[in-house]
Amino acid sequence: MWLLSCLAGWAAVALLIWIAETIFNGASPAISRFGLGFIGSRVWNPNAAGGIGSFGALDFLYGTLVSSFIALLIATPMAIAIAIYLTELAPRAIRRPVAILVELLAAIPSVILGLWGILILGPFLGKHLEPFLKSFLGWIPLFSGTPSPYGMLNAAVILTIMALPIITAITREVFESAPGELKEGSYALGATRWEMVRMVMLPVARPGIVGAVILGLGRAFGEAIAVTQVIGNATQIKASLFAAGGTLAAQIANSYQSANPGLGQASLIYLAAILLVISLIVNVVARLYVRRVRVR
Amino acid sequence: MSSTERPLRPEPSRPAAIRELPRPAVGHSVELRDLNAYYGQRHAIKGIDITFAPNEVTAIIGPSGSGKSTVVRCINRMHEEVPGARVEGSVLLDGEDVYDPRVDVTQVRRLIGMVFQKPNPFPTMSIFDNVASGLKLAGTRGAELRERVDRSLRAVGLWDEVSDRLGAPGVSLSGGQQQRLCIARTIAVEPEVILMDEPCSALDPVATLRIEELMAELKQRYTIVIVTHNMQQAARVADTTAFMLDGQLVEHGETTKIFTTPDDERTERYVTGKFG
Amino acid sequence: MEGSAIAAAPRVLAAGPGARRRRAVNRLMEAVSTLAAGLAVAVLGLVVVSVVVKAAPAISFRFITTNPQISPFGANTGGIANSIVGSLILVALATAMSVPVAVLIAIYTTEFAGGRIGALIRFALDLLNGVPTIVTGLFVFGILVLGARQSGWAGAIALAIIELPIVARSAQEVLALVPSSLREAGLALGLRRWRIVLRIVLPTALGGLITGSVLGVARVAGETAPLLFTTSTFSNLGLTTSPSQALPNIPITIFGLSESAAPSDHAQAWAASLVLILFVLLLSVVARALHERSRRRIRE
């Protein structure tokens, strides 16, 4: 028993290392050819240099960062608000049910969210929300392009739906562990409920919330399927949120079958290597803030 | 309360500091009329009638579970924060019922401050910010804020100890200092009444004595009600004492009388240590 | 009340400074919080209702029980039975591979390993959990599919890698909940360590371990990315049950249909989604209900 379990334990560690090693090995033709400049290069042309191809990750890195950050920009205040509702405002009877419902958002398979994004959210964005935003805020570059059902905004909304449950769940846990005597102390000074939340709960919960946000970020970075379904998969960087784009994960999902072997495939695996490194860093940093990494 | 009874005297606090606070025109009385309190179905406080005289320290004593803490929490309307808790009856601050539906409960709590059993300075705030926290809620800013914080810290005798590190976290102080910080925080908003729920039970004897001295000064400005399970403390600090048993007020009178010649037999049994 | 007219002390019934504004801000924030919660629940409802409503035209008993039949125009006039079977096989294989290993890992870190080794393995599990699923799929592709061909085994292994940290984490929590008094009782009886684990700890924790496995199943049943490179090109339209071949499965089927332009394909995508989402949501709810119950029981 001891031997078996010991092997199993170390197998987990070994597996992690093996994954990293395999990915970096697979990417090595591209790494040796393009080096770190790959990360800053915008070219993604399979046909350049006489059919061998010239590749760079920047467009996708941009897409990953922008779509994820927008998602978190929307998801974080919303998650904090929901956590406040669940810990302070909701009638006792509906606390657990509502909390479970919010967590169930995380259980929706990403391919189904992507389908929903293509067929329902997309048309809504393209025909209603984006023209509306453009008419009022079109002077801001973010809202300046041609409204379209596919694009960065669609991806950001989908990622918001995915990140929200994680941030909410952790924030709620941290709020629930806020010491009651601090809450009483602030009420005794004459604070309203919102003032108490601002004075006591938010400051005390701050490390946990930061960790939750970082974990949500990690989730958003790594999502391939739903994003590739809705983002339009264009290798470009545009200021407008309505425009199509690509992310690291989505590009891998999108192009792998058609990539030319050799440098093409190796470049895609290089993208995976970058994604892997980013995800691991995010996870490690999140752990500094959240002791226990919540399993989704 | 002669000084010969206190061998371990820390360096003298500054009684004059309390006079720096603005002087109210009259003292403030609190009257409880037929006060009943419930935790769900449990009838915790059963029909209490009592008046706390202005500028006096009244101690509420009694065995555990007698409802002492619940009573004071009804005075500043903290009891209703407990889910399922309910209050009936009136609590009159200078004749005005704090339970009147037109009343804003946050205003009640500003006028009736509370110090808790375990010192609870806000951990993410500095010493200064802790004392200022109540003031900031009311919109006090700038120079007036600083001045009132200084005055409060002086009034509780903390100024000399912390004036050079007002930016340090509130929780970096010792237990006794933290409790005085909480008292400073409470008086900074200029309440009329101060409720204290076993304020010294988590403190060492030296810190306890300092706070008892502080109470004697504070009562010049505020009406004080203190819950305590320590009868010696009640004898030391209180002008009036109330004895509670099982949610009911058994007896209420001058402290010396309660402890030497109480009217009620139950009171006598309690103060002589026969139970509780 | 004479004397109270003199300046200073505000009265109880008089509003304090800025009280009306503070009350308004408080009410606003309460409204915002409630709205946010409502919005989240509404989105969940919206997605689920969309799936149900849009699946209606295509969902039927036939849909679930027939294999695809591609008409000359490319439309599927049959069903997705082979995908359902394929998914069941993949998930079953993945669970059979990952759960025993996960439980063993949990046993190692809770019963045998020292603090630092346990921390290292927990750390590795967290990192494993954070690996994007598409990278995991690429990894398995690299070691199993490259130079060979796609297979159900490759897909199942990819799913197993994803399921492993989830089940292991849950198992660790559950095992840690088992009171040490039980273990001490075993030691006092002279039992060897491994016997204690097998006969005392595991049976006590069984409920929680099952719950953790159900959570893992719920998660991997819906995963698409790991299957993208490992079991996505199917040679046979009929029922395939051998894992040595690429197994059709629901997520990849939905993915493929979602990228198509034909509305009939979309309807089928919704119908397949209905099957999948019912399965996953049901499992999630069941797992959560069991979770609470088993934790309570262990503590008693």
Image (cartoon, rainbow, N blue to C red):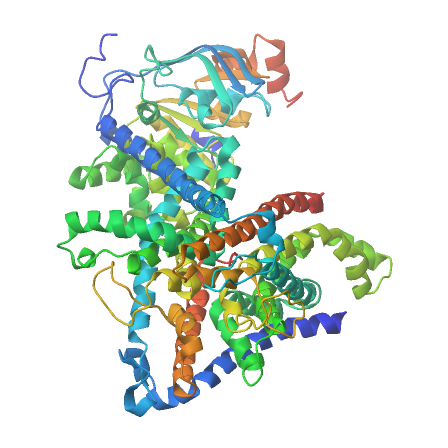
Please, which residue is most extreme toward the left here?
A139
The image quarter containing residue C237 is bottom right
> Viewed as shown, does residue B54 lie left or right of C183?
left
The percent position of residue C191, horizontal first and vertical second, equals: 85, 62
The percent position of residue B245, horizontal first and vertical second, equals: 59, 16
> Viewed as shown, does residue C92 lie left or right of A214?
right
User: In the rendered view, would you say B52 is above or below A142?
Assistant: above
Residue at (58, 45) in percent of width and height: C285
Residue at (38, 41) in percent of width and height: C39
User: In the rendered view, would you say B126 is above or below A8?
Assistant: above
User: In the rendered view, would you say B163 is above or below A46?
Assistant: above
Residue C238 in sight here: yes
C53 or B121: nearer the viewer: C53
The image quarter containing residue A283 is bottom left
Residue at (59, 9) in percent of width and height: B264
Please, which residue is most extreme toward the bottom here?
A50
A140 or A198: nearer the viewer: A140
Residue B121 in sight here: no
Residue at (30, 83) in percent of width and height: A37
Total marks shown come to 0
Q: Quadrant of the N terminus of chain B?
A: top left
Q: Quadrant of the C terminus of chain B?
A: top right
A168 or C111: nearer the viewer: A168
